[in-house]
Image (spheres, helix red, strand yellow):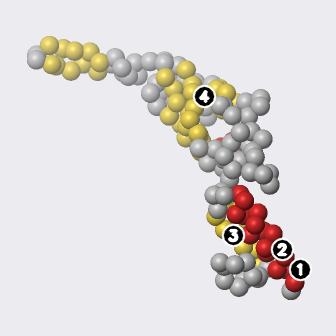
Amino acid sequence: GEAEVTCIASIPTPNVSTCGRSCSAGETTLTPFGTPPYTARAQARIEHGQTEVQSCRRLNAEFGGTMELYCEFGNLSMTHSCTGKCDEEGVNEDGLPCSTTTTTSTTEGVRGFKQYRGSLTCQVSDVAVLKRAWQFATAMTKKS
């Protein structure tokens, strides 16, 4: 970073809050999820106080969302909005929230949707609701 000098009441006053060691490209930090945790890696040099935004897919192709790598005095840390696939009970083995966009292959007759043949894409936040919709759609296709 660079130091700034401003005049306050005619007195030069330095601001060194932007001075700090940067984080090198390739520097790593561990994620707060996963057993064992995943390793997030800076793709480029990150200056002190700056962030680098990456797709969570860099960690695992099945993840959604983004992560922000943050450099503070040469230490890399991260925040994230990563999501992952969940089982039928709504559990993700890495401790992440479930991905909310789900594509199912159904035919027709799902209550609340227009009659439609082909694939049905819906966005839900409750896995139990999706499971009931899937069971209903499966039952309807067997009756057809």
Rounded to the nearest angstrom, the CA distance separating label 1 from label 4 is 55 Å
Label 1–label 2 contact, CB within 8 A: yes
Q: Position of residue 57 (x, y in %)?
A: 69, 45
- Residue 8: % across, % down: 15, 19
Label 3 neighbour load within 10 Å: few <14, some 14-19, many 20+ = few
The quarter in which the N terminus is drawn is top left
Foreground of the two, 111 or 7: 111
Q: Mark 4 or mark 2, which is nearer the start of the sequence?
A: 4
- Nearer the viewer's eye, disc 3 or disc 2? 2
In the picture shown, does residue 67 fall above or below 17? Answer: below
Residue ID for mark 4: 25
Separation of marks 2 and 4 at Cα, in angstroms: 49 Å
Give neighbour class at mark 4: few <14, some 14-19, many 20+ (Cα, 10 Å): few
Name the residue type under label 2: Thr
Mark 2 secondary-structure assignment: helix
The percent position of residue 118, horizontal first and vertical second, equals 77, 78
User: Disc 2 marks which residue?
Assistant: 138
Badge 3 marks a residue whose secondary structure is: strand
Q: CA distance from mark 3 to mark 1?
A: 20 Å
